[in-house]
Every structure is written in C-alpha cells, then in structure tokens.
Image (spheres, rainbow, N blue to C red):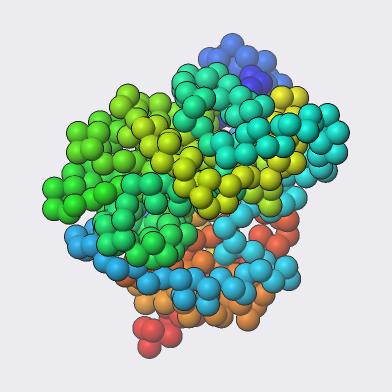
Amino acid sequence: MKLYERYAEEIADLIRAQVLRPGDRLPSVRQARRNRQISASTVFEAYYLLEARGLIQARARSGYYVNASQPSSEPGTARPVAQSAVVEISDLVFEVLGSTRNPELAPLGSAFPSPLLFPLEKLARGLTPAMRRLPPERLTEYLTIGDEQLRRQITLRYGIEGLGIAAQELVITNGAMEALNLCLQAVTAPGDVVAVESPTFYAALQALERLNLRAVEVATHPRHGIELDSLAEVLRRHPVKACWFMPSFQNPLGSLMPQQNRQALVELLAQHRVPLIEDDVYGELYFGLQRPLPAKAYDRQGWVMHCSSFSKNLAPGYRVGWVAAGRFARQVQRLKLMSTLSTAIPSQLALADFLQSGGFDRHLRQMRQTLAERQALALRLIAEHFPPGTRVTRPEGGYFLWAELPPAVDALSLQQLALEQGISVAPGHLFSADQRFSHHLRLNYGHPDLARLAAALPVIGRLAAGLAAAASR
C-alpha cells in the first residue's frame, strides 16, 4: 500500500469508528504535513482518495470536512426467538429473486458483484495453454480432492497469512455452496438442529430445508457479528449439531467479528464438541490494511470446517471453491466422491495459473478500492434520500448494506414497487426462518455502473418514504 493510501485508510478508520464525525474538519494540508512528516502531495492524494470514496468533501477556502451526508446510526441487534424451527424458505426465495436475473434491472438485489469487476479475459487466456500442458494422467489423478497445483496455491496463500492448513484436509469443490453442503451432510442427520446467524444468508436456510434440518438463530450484531453470550445460551438450551457462521463481512449484515471474538468462538464450540462450518467467501474483500484471519486460524482440535471460493472475488461462473474440513476431511472426501466426484479440471488449471502469476493480488487491490468507493456513494445517497428513521450498516468489506427502514415500511411491498421501476432489492423476509425482518433490505452496491447506482437508490428511498407516509395516514 502506498503512503497516501495508508494515510487515507487511517482517516477512514477514524470516520468509521466515529472518532471523526460528520461535519468535523480534517487537519489542514500544512498541519498534516508537519504532524506526519509527509509531503503536501501525499496529503492531497489521500484527501482526493477519501473525497472520491464519498467520506469527505472540500469546502472552498475552508479545507476538508467529513461528509455530513452519512446515516447517523446502524441497525440494532435483533434478538431471535430462542426456539429451533423447521425451515420453509425456498418458495419465497424463488418467488422474490427469480426476477433479479433480468439484465435490464438495476441489480441491487443480486447476491453477486458485477462481472465487470473481474479479469475474465485474462482468466480465459489461461484456459487453453493450461490444458495443452496438462499430462493426460492428471485428468484423473486428483479427481475427488482437486488439482494438486491449485491446492498448493491455496495452501500457500493461507501460509503467507499465517494460517497453516494441512494439504490432506483440503478438498476442491463446485463452488462454496457444495463445500458448505458437504460439511452439513458430514456432521448432521435429518431432524438435527443447526445454529445460524440472525439474520442469515437465505442459501444457508435453503440448505437446511433441503436436508430436513432445524434452524436455531443466534443474535448477531450488525458490526461485530455473532454475540457469544447468545450462542452460549443456545448451546445450553438446544442439542446443536453444527454452527454455520460467516465471521467476515457476513451476508446480509456485512459484520466483522473481532479477532478475539473468533478465538473465543472456536474455543467455546470446541468445549461443546460442536463443529463450526465457516463460510469465508468474502474474506478477501476487506477495505483495511490486512485480511482478517479466519476462525480456522484458531482451530487446534479440527472442529472448524473452513469453506471459501473464487466466485465472489475472482471468477463467478467457474464454480471453484474449497473446504479445509479438519477432523471431518475424510467424511467430506467420501461425500464428494459419492455425489459430484470432481470439480471441472480446466477451471482449476486456469485459476492455479492466475494465482501463480501474481495476478490475483493485483486484481483484488483494484476491486477493493472500487467497492469501497461504491459503498461511500451508496451511504451518501441513502442518507440523502431514504425516509427519516432509516438505519444502515457500514461494513469494513464486502459489497452489501443492510438497511433497517421505518417499521411501517413492508419490504416485500417495497420490493414489488421497485421492480416496477426496474430495480431489484432483497427484502429482509428472506434472511430468517420466521421471516421477521419485514422492514429491512439488503442492498448490493458491488456494481461499477455509477449512473445506475446513483439513479436507483433515490428511487428506492422515495418509494420507501411513500409507503411510510401511507401507513401513517
């Protein structure tokens, strides 16, 4: 990271922590230059970057100020009903999200960032050469566990970050969803109870529904993630067989568990001998200086089943994910063999070649900056156009915002009205087994088309304000 980027990130951290509040004046260029022993051009570059991200604004002959057009509060923590429940969410998911596949819609309801953010052409160029160099015996040599070169590259990335993963516990899968489903099948039987976040990603609820599992929801803070006291109570009251949690940039909240909380989480579950299925698909999309270590980094007894993929950060559509399954690696390998047998070899080879070339990190740096800029724009537009009483998260990574609207606004009604205006959103009903987040929205800002984002959010705000006003009459 360049010096001006580091200085900009320090200021951004102060704004996120509300040490610097909306309307506060930043140090002048002269003050910053003197206090930090950096050049004036470095200060200007940092301020220009923060201005582009929507965090600060320049005032003529006055200096730079924290942007006042920012939501003032975040959603509260919802205390879930402390009972396990049968999951019946798939019909609603299909009904609500089926229309989001329309390319004409502004895709704020999508679960994926825009394909335009990915180096798809560079990846495609690696497909044919990789296949030409492939010895025929390798086509079947690593069918179930995955290509050796790709597994080595993934293991190396973790090792560089200080996370040692044994090669024998790593299995390449058809995206993270297969990894997560294999983990569930390895440690549960129909009728078992699985702990999930509240709110949680609807695909997790669909997986529980398909396997005839029961869900018990754990209180989840919009900034800090799983609340450990709530989890301890759930473990005391219910025969939990597994936990499916997303510690980094959780979908839909965007929450980020502090490292000490992750360590305490792993230790608590190990004491109860409950496996943790860690969904880490957004871990590389951090806005800070360093990737947050996964919960797997604190696993000493093999109870953490760590799952991730390239679908959200490099290669959507290639369907390449993986799982480091700890003490359950053999069960996961056996289930993989009995179900899909193998993940497509050409996709694995192209990704291995791209990782080996160093292209992945260059791509991630650019993608993170783009997402941070889009988030700042989205927050500013929400503050300017959504009805009073709206509260929204400020994630430190990923590409989702979780907005709590005034209680009178029904998110499903808002979703239907937005569709009529050519905009998709994801209503909060999808993110809980009992559909109780009825006045919440998940909004995807991970699309580089600034004009569509800037046009869509004010429309959603106007529609929400109309629903709130109608309810009050």
Quarter assignment of residue 267: top left
Number of callouts: 0
Residue 183 percent across, percent down from the top left: 42, 46
Residue at (63% x, 45% y) in the render: 343
Q: Nearer the viewer, residue 146 or 399?
A: 146
- Which residue in the rendered view is the most extreme toward the left? 237
Q: Nearer the viewer, residue 171 or 28?
A: 171
Kindly tell me whether residue 389 is visible in this rendering: no
- The image position of residue 249, as x and y in percent, is 47, 44
Find residue 29 and report its horizontal and vertical position in percent.
62, 24
Q: Residue at x 47, y 76 (%)?
A: 91
Q: Quadrant of the C terminus?
A: bottom left
Image location (x, y in percent) of residue 319: 64, 49
Question: Is residue 201 shown above or below 241?
Answer: below
Q: In percent of the image, x 39 and y 43: which residue is there?
A: 277
Residue name at image x 39 percent, y 51 percent = 185
Left or right placement of residue 35 versus residue 373 in this view? left
Residue 72 is left or right of residue 77, and the answer is right
